Image: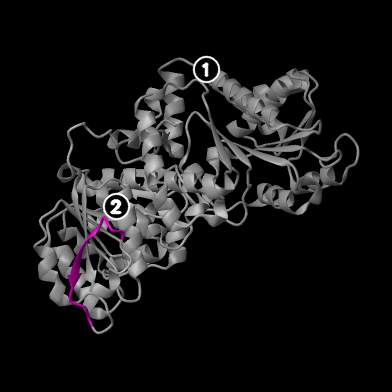
Amino acid sequence: MNVMDVLTAQQMRDADRHTIEEAGVPARVLMENAGRAVADVVAESGTGGRRILILCGRGGNGGDGLVALRALAARGLRGTAVLLADPERLTGETKANYETAMQLALHVVPCPDEATWEWALRQTGPDGLTTPRPGVVVDAILGTGSSGPLRGLAARVIADLDHVGRFRDAVRIAVDVPTGLSADTGAAPDLCFRADLTVALAAPKICHFVYPASAACGEIRVAEIGIPRVWLNAGTAGVRTNDERRVAPFFPARAPGVHKGQLGRLLLVAGSRRMPGAAALAARGALSAGVGLLTVAGPTDGLTELPPEAMRLPLPASGDGELSLDGVPEIAQFAGDAIALGPGLGSGEETKEAVRRIVLTTSLPLVLDADGLNSWAGRAARLAQRPDLALTPHPGEAARLLGLTSAEVQEDRLATARRLARETEAAVALKGPGTLIADPRGAVFVNRSGGPELAAGGSGDVLTGVVGALLARRLAPLEALSAGVFLHGLAGSEARESSGEDAVTASGVAAHLGKAVHRLRREISR
């Protein structure tokens, strides 16, 4: 995988304009390249000899669809384009490609209004849209021009695709952006085209990789259409992918003479009487990520399940068997390289205050997770006092930090990640599908490893240990989060391949971290 810039609709329009005005590439050439790329994907998808139905809007996306119709016909593949506009109102390259389709006697059915669309749905002859049953439906209606809720004809068409039975088993392919989604956010309204595959023209857009919109995009194929890469730039505060090539350099092979002290000394503060397993899982994550020396600090009852390689630092406990304030001075005296704080500590008020004191009175790079994050509910801005900080919240923890609901976080994960990083002045990994890694200056990296197999209890504890190990090895917080999140996801994939998705456990993810590191090191040598 290569790191990709993920563009907004305006950045894509600017790239188009630069290509046309400065590089002298005609707009029709770009449309031709786009349509042919879509045709390539449609042909590869396998139609089973059934008809291809291409839904075309009146703008450039519709023009791409009309080019695809012509390119498919040249391959001998049957296609029908449904033009959801009055042909007389088409302009520019879209009108030119419509006229070419007419000259070639290609099958184009104008449906400029809902009444005509409904009529076409009922037909059983050559103008009927469901007879014969289509094998592929291509959405070339709106593309990056979509904004706000769907209305009118577009809303009717998208709704019918879900409710008319003869559409349901067709392969669904979107051109650039599925209709109903905004290119610029991860929001996914109830009414939108839900694609099996999306052909991203020139560069991916934010909706392609940011959940929940990404779930409506299916597989992403990026098609080169003739726009020079120099203009496909998300900018310093933009969105990029977090891929193998980005993180592989953070995992160099060990030098022959290296010793354990050079591989980092991590203090993991975790565990309680009720949750000793959280400390054990975080410890396994840190050890399997290659930390040189690991000390686990917490109440004695929380240290009962640790691996033998971990040193123990028993601390005074509260009456509930959780970390007490009396343990803070020992933690402050730790002479190491980084601190990981939070898994399984508990939610007692004394423990929350102990966490807050540790965060504000220690100076080592620190990753804060789980109960450590919950100790700062409603106080996110106070974390800005603390340098060298990495946060790893899931949506519920992010919601508590910012005074939101989990639903609000999930509705706009990108804005939430940026806001939390800005208010805390910390590097933030907002966990979930396509984990978002944000820095306070606005840059965001969308993680491209792992999948649903990571939805297992304790998986986040393993990640805390991994990130702590990388901080101890002197990676900056943003680098440690990027490398740790990707490695964790890759280990999840390795565990899934070994035991099957449903059998993946947090311990299994930790056990596959070494294999994942080896895979990344092979990437460096390529």
Q: Is residue 382 visible?
A: yes
Q: Mark 2 points at which residue?
A: 286
Amino acid carrying label 2: it is Ala
- Viewer-closest of 317 and 224: 317
Find the magenta span and give its range.
307-318
Report the side of 169 relative to 242 (left or right): right
Q: Which residue is drawn at 39% across and 49% down?
A: 436
Q: Residue furthest right?
A: 125
- Viewer-closest of 171 and 33: 171
Q: Name the residue under label 1.
A: 26
- Viewer-closest of 428 and 314: 314
Amino acid carrying label 1: it is Pro
Residue 276 is marked as none
Report the side of 21 relative to 473 (left or right): right
Point out the tag, 2 or 1, that comes first from the N-terminus: 1
Is residue 82 positioned above or below 438 on the image? above
Q: Where is residue 262 in the image (x, y as percent from the top left)?
A: 16, 42
Element class at badge 2: helix
Q: Position of residue 16 (x, y in %)?
A: 46, 26
Residue 314 in the magenta stretch? The answer is yes
Report how far apart the C-alphas of labels 2 and 1 lie in the structure: 54 Å
Element class at badge 1: loop
Q: Which residue lies furthest to the front in this view?
A: 308
Q: Quadrant of residue 394?
A: bottom left
